[in-house]
Image (cartoon, rainbow, N blue to C red):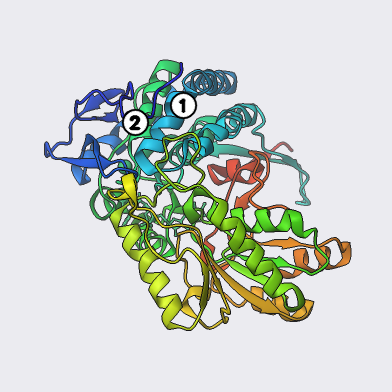
Amino acid sequence: MTVDVSTARHPFLDGKPKRMLIDGKWLEAASGKTFETINPSTGEVLARVAEGDSEDIDRAVEAARRAFNGPWSKVKPFERQNLLLKLADLVDKHFEELASLDTLDMGAPISRTKGSRLRAVGMLRYYAGQATAIHGETIENSLPGDYVSYTLKEPVGVVGAIIPWNGPLTATIWKIGPALATGCTVVLKPAEEAPLTPLRLAELCLEAGVPPGVVNVVTGYGETAGAALSSHMDVDKVAFTGSHITGQKIIQASAGNLKRVSLELGGKSPDVVFADADLDAAVPGASMAVFANSGQICSAGTRLFVERRIYEEFTSRVADFSKTLRVGNSSNPDTQIGPLVSPEQLERVTGYLAIGRQEGARPLSGGARLTDGDMANGYFVPPTVFADVRDDMRIAQEEIFGPVISAIPFDDIEEVIARANATTFGLGSGLWTRDVTKAHKLAKGIRAGSVWINCYQAMDPAVPFGGYKMSGYGRESGKQHVEEYLNVKAVWIKTG
Ligand code: NAP
Ligand code: MG
């Protein structure tokens, strides 16, 4: 189906308040309350959404537990694989609609969200493959006498999944996919800023035949619904993606029943450009490593280290490139840079623009909110390049989560490794060079979960992604991700 996103006449936006999915039924919040979700390009209200809180979380966790202990525990790997493949086909079939819902609700340009088809569908197909690849091991032991020892892999149980707003479709799939593959059940709490795509995806789960209670979606606020989910005594694991500050609260909330926690948090990732790099590739590469999705990507390469002898030339080329990017309403197919997600994010990012200037950084492009023409009611910040940034400035240390590059000169490789690591975070990192020795040295030396060489932000469902240090722990994608949703049980048999 081709969906017209230039108007907000999206088939999912029928004017009715959106309900939550609990136990296979679409329900209002127990309190009857709702909240608004808006289009950040225009400030218009897209829909009212059920405002779930602890009572709704209780209902959803009960349903998830019943499903986990009951029929879902008997479902064989082939059947779980089939469900995931059916869901993949449905996501493929309805992809335009899902992509445009992401665009309307969180503001990523339609050119970007439409480009995520392979990723979204591919993730589900990858997890479908993993559903039939789960196995324990037979392990030789050295006990005197005759014993056989082997391991079983079992689903951890009820998973509470809490996601941010910066990529609702793929973030939802990243939580639901491994849960279905392993035989867990899930209660998902989407971000308040972008709850619509997760709700539409939940409809597709039902259409694919996912049984009642296996996937539940409780929309609402973090401080209420999210907190209730992360502290719930009958949730076995919380899979969280978001800021490190909320991540710390999740760990505290997990203490009551010592539930398992995996955390995909933020970053202040270094991107290092050596003078010997292919600069024609590095200019757009290092620029879009930050400006894509208006900088609202956890692993964005926001600390741009540039070798001193090309520093002036390179930073001015990046600034020139940034000025060519078309900023505007994200439903316009020509738009390359959409708005920030919310007035709060706008305030946060423009606050950092002021801080950068106060700290003595030199703006080469962007630097102030855009309000021209029909951007007046949206939350637009243009791509911004700050030069003459020092490591100790706040714009070099704190995650801005906006389209802001902090460009920093460096002189040699040992120095840049140490400075790249001088951050509390460790999520992404990049480097641009033609010298394989330098490339390998940095790949080993940088303390981060991903290193991109002569590229940035490459992702695949089979390749693990996650953080070092305060960027969190646990991995998403890859075999490691599936293990996060499994317990290992050792079985001993005395055969003598
Ligand atoms: P956030 O404020 O931490 O919110 C993330 C989620 O947690 C939202 O659903 C939020 O609900 C919920 N939440 C808030 N307070 C909570 C609490 N006390 N207990 C339980 N849940 C709570 O982060 P954000 O501002 O939405 O997202 C931006 C951050 O996410 C950035 O730091 C970014 O780097 C990080 N991120 C990381 C990755 C990754 O894979 N590593 C990916 C994307 C984003 P509400 O929406 O209702 O507040
Ligand atoms: Mg919205």
Three-letter residue code for mark 1: Ser
Residue 104 shows in the view? yes
Total tally of numbered discs in the picture: 2
**Displayed quadrant of residue 199:** top left
SS at mark 1? helix
Q: Name the residue under label 1.
A: 73
10 Å crowding of disc 1: few (<14), some (14-19), many (20+): some
Where is the C terminus found, in terms of image quarters? top right
Mark 2 or mark 1, whichever is nearer to me: 2
Say what secondary structure mark 2 lies in.
helix
Q: Does residue 51 appear in this view?
A: no
Observer-nearest of 353 and 200: 353
Q: Residue at x 49, y 24 (%)?
A: 95
- The residue nearer to you, when weighing 88 against 256, is 88
> Along the polypeptide, which appears first: circle 2 or circle 1?
1
Disc 2 residue: CB within 8 Å of ligand 2: no
Instruction: Write the residue at 80% across / 58% down.
Output: 278
Provide residue 254's location: percent of width, then percent of height. 37, 57
Kindly identify the amino acid type of the residue bearing the numbered disc 2. Answer: Leu
Gap between marks 2 and 1, in whole Å?
25 Å
Report which residue position mark 2 lands on.
199
Q: Is residue 48 left or right of residue 117?
A: left
Looking at the image, is 214 positioned above or below residue 341?
A: above
In the rendering, at what x and y percent does residue 231 appear? 31, 54
Ligand 1's quadrant is: bottom left
Q: Relative to 304, is 335 above or below?
A: above
When asked about the image quadrant of residue 28, the answer is top left
Could you say which is closer to the camera, residue 95 or residue 192? 95
**In screen coordinates, is 41 left or right of 129?**
left
